[in-house]
């Protein structure tokens, strides 16, 4: 647990939160700066800075808790959909450096939903760039898979 981390403070009970759910590994609470009505944050109790650092077991637990909360929120709030979002790094909008998933109910009724897309889905990217980047990523993932299986 980090003494300077607000989310660690929430888990410890020294920082107030509106708790939604808790188990041995995870803690879920209402976001104080919500993108929509019912926006929840799901975190591991054990501090991990981001997606790159979180242990696989904690990531699994947080993801499964987020799924359970997303289903409940959609039913309870009458949401038309749900976004699950992670921001990893300051340039990817991470502002609290304790891994977390945002569970954001989405509504057709925009009085309940303030979230807007930062890009235009359906706008194709450059095919050559996409193929080149996909090939590079596939190659490095294949290399790592081969070395971890040895």
Image (tube, grey):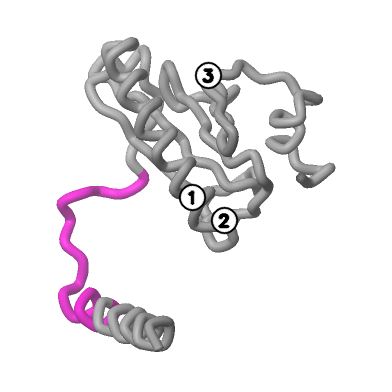
Label 3 – label 2 distance at C-alpha: 22 Å
Secondary structure of residue under mark 2: loop
Residue at the spot x=76%, y=24% of the render? 13
For image coordinates 36% across by 28% down, the residue present is: 68
| Residue 110, x across and y down, in percent | 31, 17
State the residue position of label 2.
54
Q: Position of residue 26 (x, y in %)?
A: 56, 35
Look at the numbered disc 3 and give the secondary structure of its residue. Answer: strand
Quadrant of residue 111 in the image?
top left
Residue at horizontal 42%, vertical 82%? Answer: 148
Among the two numbered marks 3 and 1 on one chain, the one whose residue lies closer to the N terminus: 3
Image: magenta residue range: 118-133
**Mark earlier in primary sequence (2, 1):** 2
User: Badge 1 is on which residue?
Assistant: 59
Q: Is residue 35 above or below residue 19?
A: below
Residue located beneath label 3 in the image:
20
- Mark 2 or mark 3, which is nearer the start of the sequence? 3
Q: Are marks 3 and 1 in contact (CB under 8 Å)?
A: no
């Amino acid at each position: 647990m980090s003494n300077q981390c607000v989310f660690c403070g929430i888990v410890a009970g020294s920082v107030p939160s509106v708790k939604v759910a808790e188990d041995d590994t995870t803690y879920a609470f209402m976001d104080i700066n919500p993108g929509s009505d019912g926006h929840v944050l799901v975190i591991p109790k054990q501090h991990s800075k981001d997606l790159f650092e979180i242990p696989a077991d904690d990531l699994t637990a947080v993801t499964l808790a987020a799924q359970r909360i997303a289903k409940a929120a959609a039913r309870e709030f009458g949401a038309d959909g749900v976004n699950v979002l992670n921001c990893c790094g300051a340039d990817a909008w991470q502002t609290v450096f304790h891994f977390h998933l945002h569970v954001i109910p989405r509504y057709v009724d925009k009085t309940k939903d303030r979230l807007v897309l930062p890009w235009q889905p359906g706008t194709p990217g450059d095919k050559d760039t996409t193929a080149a980047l996909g090939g590079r990523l596939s190659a490095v993932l294949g290399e790592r898979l081969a070395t971890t299986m040895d």
